[in-house]
Image: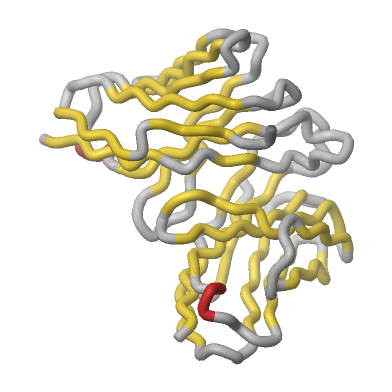
Amino acid sequence: QQQVKQSPQSLIVQKGGISIINCAYENTAFDYFPWYQQFPGKGPALLIAIRPDVSEKKEGRFTISFNKSAKQFSLHIMDSQPGDSATYFCAASMLPGGTSYGKLTFGQGTILTVHP
Amino acid sequence: SQTIHQWPATLVQPVGSPLSLECTVEGTSNPNLYWYRQAAGRGLQLLFYSVGIGQISSEVPQNLSASRPQDRQFILSSKKLLLSDSGFYLCAWRAGTEYFSYEQYFGPGTRLTVT
């Protein structure tokens, strides 16, 4: 019930195209859904995050779509650029209070390659 | 602003040798601290977390241990390394004093190779 399932494992997109990565979760107690971007040899960087009280959040070219009833959320990268080539992780956590302590459960990651 | 440091950046150690990885956070007080391991560039597994000095919780049984001797210092250790301990070790922090602060920030990581 703690799992977060991410798909696809890898994605190839042409420059200017839209990249879409999907995640699904089972634990309805999850209350926070971030996306991280990781370049080779670097630590993951927080990209964008959403709470269940909204269905969409947009920051620049990055958008999270959230479907609470389906227990799914996705990352959309508009006008994808070669510099976006990285591994993307979705994650989920419960409210930091109580015994969860903000622990993140991660998806397995998606390797995105944007061809010029 | 807050920054998180990890060292060393890379480490090659023989099987059976001890290990000590260090993580420090600057610019915040009483953070929640986390150790993750990432194998083969995919999937982050939470190993330990700490909500205060001397308070350590383990997520998975393993050959590793963690300690928090100071508020902003988190150490990952092993007495005898195994080949399976190889991986990319990441430290992360969250603002522990803010109840609704969800954001977790990662350090640059330590690449450990056990030979």
Residue name at image x 88 percent, y 36 percent: A98
Q: Is residue B82 left or right of residue B79?
A: left
| Location of residue A33 with respect to B89 vertically, above or below | above
Q: What is the quadrant of residue A106 in the picture?
A: top right
Q: How many marks?
A: 0
Residue name at image x 53 percent, y 73 percent: B84
Q: What is the quadrant of residue B34 in the picture?
A: bottom right
Which quadrant would the C terminus of chain A be assigned to in this image? top left
**Residue B60 image position (x, y, % from top left):** 72, 59
Q: Is residue A8 left or right of residue B81?
A: left
Which quadrant would the N terminus of chain A be assigned to in this image? top right
Q: Is residue A7 left or right of residue A56?
A: left
B48 and B93: which is toward the camera: B48
Residue name at image x 37 percent, y 20 percent: A76
| Location of residue A7 with respect to B77 vertically, above or below | above
Q: What is the quadrant of residue B16 in the picture?
A: bottom right
| Location of residue B41 with respect to A103 vertically, above or below | below
| Location of residue A104 with respect to B64 vertically, above or below | above
Q: Is residue A11 left or right of residue B56?
A: left
**Residue B62 image position (x, y, % from top left):** 70, 69
**Residue A37 image position (x, y, % from top left):** 42, 40
